[in-house]
């Protein structure tokens, strides 16, 4: 290392330390009668050790970028528990999480966690009547809806967020279908709440026996938002298998995402408005897992998770024109694209890739990944804070050594993660 390379190295050291070293070098050169030729032949680290024999080398860390994406996490209280959907209460600024006892399945135990939205400290853990999976919220009346989705339950509970009290639980949501394959296939999925109609919309699925074999049955149920009484179902809400369900708060339109279609539903009148055909998307959509919409730009954001091909080569984020279903873009975010959120404040999309164990930040104009976070295991459902400045994600663990031999860690607890989105 010559003296000029040594000088370049010193430039990486803190200014204060660098100034101190050069001052001492100037003095000690005279005391030890060293010349610049001798100095240039010596490795810099030897020079520093020569000049500062008793001083510990203290180099400042690189300056931290204060712009965005600070991470914070906290854990559920027991490794037996699994975290599912999240909800953000605008009034109390709390994050609620639907949690189930994932190990002792026969016990059918469920919980509702409330986290401090800033510190992520667990503020309360409420016992639910059954296993808890899905969430929806009435922000004005401070009522949280908890979906007990499995066939053993098939009920909805209402929870008062200010008092922390369970208000009521619905009757079992069952349907008589003569060709139903098995009662165990009955399942409740995602939910959305419409303030304008005081109606909770709940996706329901089952399997039917037909001459052609087993076929899925899907319904969009309507429950009274106050009494939880079943009001009926939205006619023709589904054209086939569909898992994605979302609602645009501004337009009060509900969107159901299927393999080759998106259905648009009027939440006020509870009627199907139109079916938007997806026009030959590439790669071919195999199974819409979830979706989000931006009515201001007439776009739908669809995430695809191919459950038959876990390699995830066709998984990712599809951007579609809400007016005609035309494909506007595609981003291969990762295997097992599971959930998507659109943030109009920063013009960004956030995608959890369950199988890849990553969270992708996508520019909503360029349709390119701008940031990726690697999780140890399975990022799942998400929710945004009311000011759009924080993203919360549920992080799941491997279920057991038989199901997840590569990632299962005995005693590991599932958790929630927050990502600070604010720009400095």
Image (tube, helix red, strand yellow):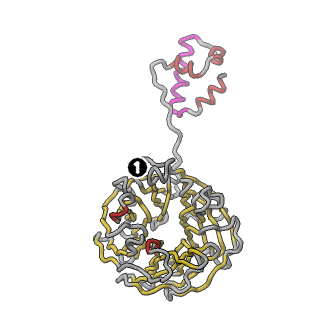
- Total number of numbered labels? 1
x and y percentages locating residue 85 in the rendered image: 44, 65
User: Please, which residue is most extreme toward the top here?
Assistant: 33
Q: Give residue 57's position: percent from left, percent from top.
A: 49, 26
Mark 1 surroundings: few (<14), some (14-19) or many (≥20) residues within 10 A:
some
337 in magenta: no
- Evaluate whether residue 188 shows in this view: no
Nearer to the camera, 11 or 339: 339
Tell me if residue 70 comes above or below residue 91 in the rendering. Answer: above
| Residue at 38%, 71% in the rendered image | 152
Rendered position, 88 above or below 181? above
> Which residue sits at x=35%, y=79%?
170
- Residue lying farthest to the bottom in this orientation: 269
Query: Residue 51: x percent and y percent?
Result: 52, 18
Name the magenta segment's main secondary structure: helix
Q: Would residue 132 be seen by someone viewing this image from the given angle?
A: yes
Q: Secondary structure at mark 1?
A: loop
Residue 318: image quadrant is: bottom right
* Residue 189 image position (x, y, % from top left): 47, 72
In terms of depth relative to the viewer, which is nearer, 197 or 424? Answer: 197
Report if residue 20 lies within the magenta region. Answer: yes
Q: Which residue is mark 1?
A: 412
Residue depicted at x 38% and y 48%: 411
Please tell me which residue lies in front, 12 or 343: 343
* Magenta span: 13-33
- Above or below, 236 against 65 in this view is below
């Amino acid at each position: 290392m010559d003296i000029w390379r040594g000088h370049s190295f010193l430039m990486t050291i803190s200014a204060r330390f660098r100034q101190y070293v050069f001052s001492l070098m100037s003095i000690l050169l005279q005391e030890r009668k060293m010349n610049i030729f001798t100095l240039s032949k010596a490795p810099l680290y030897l020079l520093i050790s020569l000049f500062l024999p008793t001083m510990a080398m203290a180099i400042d860390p690189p300056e931290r970028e204060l712009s965005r994406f600070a991470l914070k996490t906290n854990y559920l209280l027991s490794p037996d528990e699994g975290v599912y959907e999240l909800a953000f209460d605008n009034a109390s600024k709390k994050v609620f999480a639907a949690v189930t006892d994932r190990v002792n399945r026969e016990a059918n135990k469920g919980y509702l966690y409330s986290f401090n939205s800033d510190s992520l400290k667990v503020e309360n853990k409420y016992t639910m009547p059954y296993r808890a999976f899905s969430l929806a919220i009435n922000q004005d009346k401070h009522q949280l809806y908890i979906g007990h989705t499995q066939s053993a339950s098939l009920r909805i509970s209402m929870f008062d967020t200010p008092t922390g009290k369970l208000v009521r639980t619905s009757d079992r949501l069952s349907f008589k279908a003569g060709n139903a394959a098995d009662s165990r296939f009955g399942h409740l999925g995602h939910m959305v709440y419409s303030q304008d109609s005081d109606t909770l919309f709940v996706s329901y699925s089952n399997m039917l026996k037909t001459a052609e074999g087993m076929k899925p049955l899907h319904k969009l149920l309507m429950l009274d938002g106050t009494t939880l009484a079943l009001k009926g179902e939205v006619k023709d809400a589904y054209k086939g298998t569909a898992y994605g369900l979302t609602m645009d708060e501004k337009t009060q339109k509900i969107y159901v995402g299927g393999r080759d279609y998106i259905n648009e539903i009027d939440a006020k009148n509870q009627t199907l408005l139109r079916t938007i055909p997806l026009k030959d998307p590439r790669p071919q959509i195999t199974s819409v897992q979830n979706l989000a919409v931006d009515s201001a730009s007439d776009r739908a954001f669809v995430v695809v998770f191919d459950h038959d091909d876990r390699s995830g080569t066709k998984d990712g984020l599809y951007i579609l024109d809400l007016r005609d279903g035309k494909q506007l873009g595609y981003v291969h975010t990762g295997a097992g694209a599971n959930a998507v959120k659109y943030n109009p404040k920063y013009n960004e999309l956030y995608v959890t890739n369950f199988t890849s164990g990553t969270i992708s930040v996508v520019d909503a104009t360029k349709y390119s990944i701008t940031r990726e976070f690697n999780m140890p295991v399975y990022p799942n459902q998400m929710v945004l804070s009311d000011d759009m400045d924080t993203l919360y994600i549920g992080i799941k663990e491997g279920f057991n050594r038989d199901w997840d031999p590569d990632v299962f860690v005995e005693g590991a607890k599932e958790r929630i993660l927050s990502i600070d989105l604010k720009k400095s």
